[in-house]
Image (cartoon, rainbow, N blue to C red):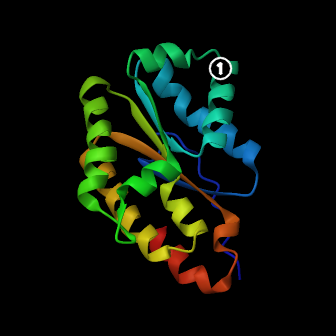
Amino acid sequence: ENPEPVHASPHADEARHVTRFYDDEEALTVELADFALPALESGGAFVCIARPAHMQALAAALGERGVDLAAAAAERRWLWLDCAGTLEAITHGGAPDREVFVRLVAKPIEAICARCENVRVFGEMVALQCERGDYAGAVQLEGFCNEIVEKLPVAVFCAYPMASFADPRTHADFTRIC
């Protein structure tokens, strides 16, 4: 039996860590824009650890809503890290390396939190690991990400394609990650 999608409202005042399971890319883009917009409009920051297609769709959606991402980037309030490249950089010996994760992901977010009050993060690295079938690594990386939520004043939005958990044998992994 496939897990049912979670239809959570991704607003920082409602939850600090929102998880979304999706089948519809356009709906995901709308939810991401809704999540990012309050931070960017309030002088806060948005960190996007995403695949290029999702980052481009999000950038277009935010642009349509009047957000000047070039200005936000120049003010160091918009940071995009390529999901696959970042995942590759933090993986050593087939597993996520906590020290490298802290240096490449957690420390930059911590620096942004020192400058901005409303910081929101979107991440897809765990989802990418699930898509690759590396559920053990995904669980480990999810733990690293949870440490950020516990330590820093951020709201995090994670998104997973439902197809990553379509196989009934992945149900235990699904519950460990979520």
| Left or right of 53 in this view: 112 | left
Q: Residue at x 69, y 37 (%)?
A: 30
Farthest bottom residue in view = 169
Q: Residue at x 28, y 54 (%)?
A: 100
Image quadrant occupied by the N terminus: bottom right
Q: Which quadrant of the structure image shows residue 22? A: bottom right
> Does residue 160 appear in this view?
yes
Q: Residue at x 44, y 55 (%)?
A: 87
Residue 135, how many percent across, how many down?
A: 49, 74
Query: In this picture, is 106 found above or below 113?
Result: below
> Does residue 13 appear in this view?
no
Nearest the eye: 5 or 136: 136
Nearest the eye: 120 or 124: 124
Query: In this picture, is 175 found above or below 76?
Result: below
Nearest the eye: 55 or 158: 55
For disc 1, the neighbor class at 10 Å (few under 14, some 14 to 19, many from 20) is few
| Left or right of 109 in this view: 14 | right
Query: In this picture, is 28 found above or below 171?
Result: above
| Left or right of 178 in this view: 58 | right
Q: Mark 1 falls on what kind of element?
A: helix
Residue 158, how many percent across, how many down?
A: 52, 52
Residue 5, how many percent across, how many down?
A: 67, 63
Tally of numbered discs: 1
Q: Residue at x 51, y 40 (%)?
A: 11
Q: Mark 1 belongs to which amino acid?
A: Gly
Query: In this picture, is 157 found above or below 43?
Result: below
Residue 96, how many percent across, how many down?
A: 36, 64
Q: Which residue is mark 1?
A: 63
